[in-house]
Amino acid sequence: MADIVLTTLNARYSHTAFGLRYLLANLGPLRSAAVIREFDISQRPIDIAETLLAGNPKIIGLGIYIWNVAPATELVAILKRARPDIHVILGGPEVSYEAESQPITQLADCVITGEADLKFAEVCGQLLAGKPPAGKIIPAGFPGFAQLAMPYDLYDDQDIAHRIIYVEASRGCPFSCEFCLSSLDIPVRQAPLPSLFDALQRLLDRGVRQFKFVDRTFNLNTSVSQAILEFCLERCQPGHFFHFEIVPDHLPESLREVIARFPPGALQLEAGVQTFNEQSAAMVHRRQDYPRLEDNLRFLRRETGAHIHADLVAGLPGESMESFAAGFDRLLALGPQEIQVGILKRLRGTSIARHDAEWQMVYSPHPPYTILQNNLMDFASLRRLQRFARYWDLVANSGNFVGSAPLIWSLHASPFEAFMRWSEWLHARVGRADGIALVRLMELIFTFLTGELNLNLRKTAAALWDDYRRGGRHDKPAFLKDLLPADALPSPSREPHPALPKRQARHLA
């Protein structure tokens, strides 16, 4: 039983609600009257409502994001119908902009926009005292880290054993990319390192092995990022894994040196390249030094054991399919283990909408507000790109086909065009972009490589078998049995590191 329940619908169970823990840590005298209840979007809103109402709370604080706003709207409607006396407070990026027009905000009692770490406690105090705020939309400021209690001790043993542990060393972003919400999050604020390091050490002592830093520009301040990397490196043990999002064209020698000392697989760097089209980048205020970016990525792949996850965005104004394809091939040549192909979204509050008329940008009205077409890419082209992105994730990014995936583009000058051919071929046969079992996908790849590209049967089978064992699997798929030599019976060639995330472990094996 608790007067205040903090809740949200995570994208999946393995995710933890970092924001809720900040709210609870900063409730002050109300903290003892509050609990966190986390759910995920696979659960039905009616079932979530039943669980929440069973505790008979007075206030429900609900975190709203682009991935959960639809089921969360249904949840709030149920809560207010069943218990209209309960105060529902919304917060999060999805309701921090254009809030007045959203159905979910019309259902709720209060909406806190911006960073609610401190404002939430203030609003709860007013509501429990019978003095509700004068307006529904309540803006929050940008608190400095010195004002905040850190939330890291609120990760429980289940979180540590089974879920992603999020941490942050800074908030904000100095850049003004028009498609990104982070461009609205200013100024950049730095967490005090002594207290952050104390918190990280406590997590390490409790057995945390995987840390995901949520900083938007981790390497912006070289001295701070170097200190954090040195802290992690000094304590790095087998199975430790640290994720950072970096500015890809900013990697001075001091950072290169410490990154190169991490053991293979211990470090993942997310590099937001987004586009190689300089005209498009300039239009959306994406500032980037491309020669330096390319030099940094080559260094990371050739001279470090870091796992590189690079991002590209399709659908930007001024970027055609041909331009995107050239950028994709350029990025692939730099060798990142993963390329996430994202489709442009019109996030609430961002200024990307100012290009709508000139470039005929048309977005879905429903979350996640993906672009449907523009004057350089029609609806059919963008649908093809969405399938391409999903199949690339299943085949190239997954680590399940490290050796065999490159065979798809081995005979073509453009890997993008070659993989698009495979993507279209696959879609014509399965008619879907998810729910394809691994062995079925292997067999389809084999059929494409040997039937469409006329690659050698036994060499292709050997490549797929080697990839299959890369994941620590021992059984031999039926379609391969007659094509492998007798000494290729089920004995694994290598096992992925059991303590690393599965995708990264397969790339490393």
Image (spheres, helix red, strand yellow):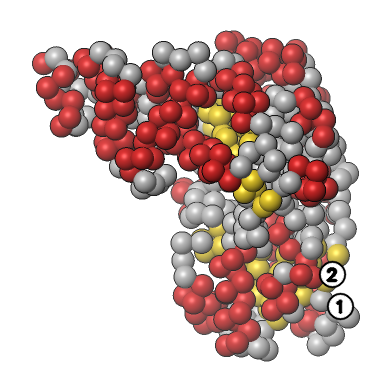
Whether the residues at callouts 2 and 1 have beta carbons within 8 Å, the answer is: yes
Residue 135 — which label? 1
Give the image location of residue 486, x and y in percent: 11, 16
* 197 vs 471, nearest the viewer: 471
Q: Would residue 132 be visible to someone looking at this image? A: yes
Instruction: Give the residue drawn at x 57%, y 74%.
Output: 74
What is the number of callouts on the image?
2
Instruction: Give the residue drawn at x 78%, y 81%.
Output: 127
Q: Would residue 196 be visible to someone looking at this image? A: no
* 283 vs 332, nearest the viewer: 283
* 32 vs 408, nearest the viewer: 408
Q: What quarter of the picture does the N terminus occupy?
A: bottom right
* 471 vs 458, nearest the viewer: 458
Instruction: Give the residue drawn at x 67%, y 36%.
Output: 376
Give the image location of residue 157, x and y in percent: 50, 53
Left or right, 306 with respect to 287, comes to: left
Give the image location of residue 254, x and y in percent: 75, 15
Q: Secondary structure at mark 2?
A: strand
269 lies above or below 355: above
423 lies above or below 366: above
User: How dense is the environment of label 1, judged by Cα within 10 Å: few (below 14), some, or many (20 and up)?
Assistant: few
Name the residue that disc number 2 marks.
138
Q: What amino acid is labelled 2 in the image?
A: Ile
Give the image location of residue 353, x and y in percent: 79, 49
Q: What quarter of the picture does the C terminus occupy?
A: top left
Left or right, 197 with respect to 419, comes to: right
Q: Quadrant of residue 65?
A: bottom right
Left or right, 412 with respect to 479, comes to: right
221 lies above or below 67: above
